[in-house]
Amino acid sequence: MLAMPIMMGMDIFMGTAEIRFIIKQLGGRNAPLLQVLLAVQDAAPQRYLSEEAVNEIARLLEISRCRVYSTASFYSEISLEPRGIHLIRVCTNAPCENAGKQEIQEAIERELGITVGQTTTDGLFTLESVNCLGACFMSPAIKVDDTLYGNLTTESVVSVLDSFRKEQCHGCK
Amino acid sequence: MGVNNKELVFNISREEFVDLKTYRERGGYTALQKALRQPPESSIQELKSAGLRGRGGAAFPTAVKIEMVRNNGETGRYVICNADEGEPGTFKDRFIMTHLPFQVIEGITLAAYLAGAENGYIYVRHEYPEVQRILRESIKEAEEAGLLGEDILGSGIRLKLEIFSGAGSYLCGEETALLSSIEGRKGRPRVKPPYPTQSGLWNKPTLINNVETLANIPKIIEKGSGWYRSIGTADSTGTKLISLSGDVVNRGLIEVPFGITFADIIEEYGLGAKPGRTVKAVNIGGASGVLVPGFMLETPLEYTACAKAGITIGSGAIFVLDDTRPILPNVHNRVKFFLHESCGKCTPCREGLRQANVILSKLLSGMATESDVVLLERYTRAIQEASFCGLGQAAGNSLKSSLEYFHEEYLAACGQECRDKEETA
Ligand SMILES: Cc1cc2nc3c(=O)[nH]c(=O)nc-3n(C[C@H](O)[C@H](O)[C@H](O)COP(=O)(O)O)c2cc1C
Ligand code: SF4
Ligand code: FES
């Protein structure tokens, strides 16, 4: 499978200028910390908060790094580890579990060769679990990036993954 | 009582997005105009007579809460719409916000005006990016139409409304944890009192209401409390949005008048259990709610009747389990959820849930004995009674209901091997 390779471990650093810009947009020194963390993470190439980003946020908001880490680590949607281009999140709550969440998750794991919490070696997908997506009317449900997929079967979930692989390949044709 | 009854409060249709123009054509924003013309006290009285109660879980009378903020001498008050919707099995707020964003915004504007707040937030969970997008656009549109922002409808009243994104913490739906979250800290709950109405965001009086609660307000002001009281029962007025999921033919969002029985909701709207199966248990109110056996479903959806039966209406989630489903895996799923979401601040919740998780794993692998079940009952009481906040208390309640109504499944799960060992010991 051809996908844009991202070397894991090589930190693609977000410029401090970009972080400064985000903070300015959100209100400068008094910008709400949680919104800053989410915005910086969204803009980061590997959608996580790097150590450099944390340092820069602490400096610009004039708060301690400890404070930034303490808030960042509390929230499940914030990652301190690099993630893949596409984030797959499998809902783990009872309505989805009853509707076959385990089979769906195993199908994804088999297809990608990773388990929950891991990123594929080509850097294309990260697999995570998530709490109820408010999509229990179509359990089992998953989210890939910002899109919801419901009423999944072990086959249909693989075609969802394929659609993201294809999309990635447009650029390398 | 049909699904297409246009006389209810929301009348959400899955295919329809009600934009500002359509919303106004259907009477949207007449409530705000009316409220701005009459003394605030009259509008608050209307909400009081309507008997509107909070739809976020605690069912507190909304008008009383608004009054508490209004009568607080401190200025710089806030209004917060709680759109954190994290309760597993719940998707009603998502539907309101995606289909009727302006009804939510008008409701917040009215609540802010009545409470005397000029700044507000909609705290939306990060897992709902499309909802955040719709709300951002709708806020902008309302501002451009003079319905929000400075000088609303030429009245001199102002409200600056912003979206605040959560970041994946179920606990942040708890009102004081939500405040800490906006203030940039870990989303841990605070001691009450002081209540948010006294000392909330940045220590200012703060009105916090659920999306569904706030979206009820424009309809009540527009059509009057008499109309509102004509829906539902004397005890519980108006309608409730129900998120129906699990082993039924028809899953989805439904709006029902209070007073209907749970059995009727499942039969009429959910079209009952799947062919050849029967309803065994129903989880009402999400993970925090109770797990009740089929025979209790004749209870009407009504605050007093439910409280008497030990049922928590909560967010209005109804999750159905049919006769093919064992109870323990479901309970274990919920315990794992609460354990993951516990903030670890107090011991009964943190350690109690950890122990409950261990015992349930043992039960499910056939390694537990009856003394483990007794121990689980003890931990459950501790979690229920000694937890600091609603998360732990609710976790305890939900565990307790399963131990009470499905005790035989716990006993049956005690491994035969272990039972033999106990007998010989
Ligand atoms: C653990 C926990 C999670 C909660 N989550 C939510 C939520 O997602 N949405 C909500 O409106 N209320 C939630 N609540 C209830 C709020 O604390 C609060 O009572 C409610 O927002 C008040 O609004 P209402 O009076 O309109 O119901 C939660 C409570 C607890 C203890
Ligand atoms: S009950 Fe649980 S979630 Fe609530 S404060 Fe205690 S540890 Fe935190
Ligand atoms: S339980 Fe999976 S979307 Fe709600």
Image (tube, grey):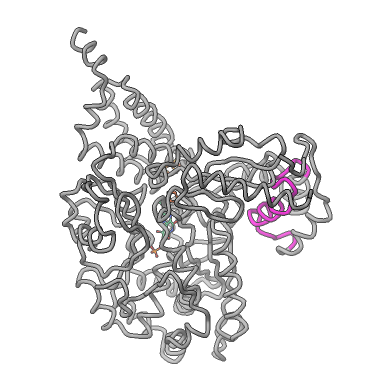
Counting from the top left corner in percent of width and height, residue A33 is at 66, 54
Whether B363 is drawn above or below A138: the answer is above
* Quadrant showing the N terminus of chain A: top right
Left or right: B253, with B302 as reference point: right
Residue at horizontal 71 percent and vertical 49 percent from the top: A168
Which quarter holds ligand 1?
bottom left
In which quadrant of the rendered view does residue B408 lie? top left
- Camera-side residue of B21 and A169: A169
**Residue A85 image position (x, y, % from top left):** 69, 46
Q: What is the magenta range?
A: A28-52
Q: Residue furthest front?
A: A173
What count of labels does the image hold? 0
Q: Quadrant of residue B412?
A: top left
- Magenta stretch encompasses residue B192: no
Q: Is residue B198 visible?
A: no
Tell me, yes or no, if residue B24 can be seen here.
yes
The residue at 30%/44% (across/down) is B397
Residue most extreme to the top? B424
The location of residue B262, given as percent across then percent down, is 22, 58
B136 vs A98, left or right, is right
A37 part of magenta stretch: yes
Q: Nearer the viewer, residue B156 or B224?
A: B224
Q: Residue at x 35, y 57 (%)?
A: B251
Percent x, y for residue A109? 56, 35
| Main SS class of the magenta portion in the image | helix
Depth order, front residue of A42/B345:
A42
**Which quadrant of the figure has residue B291?**
top left
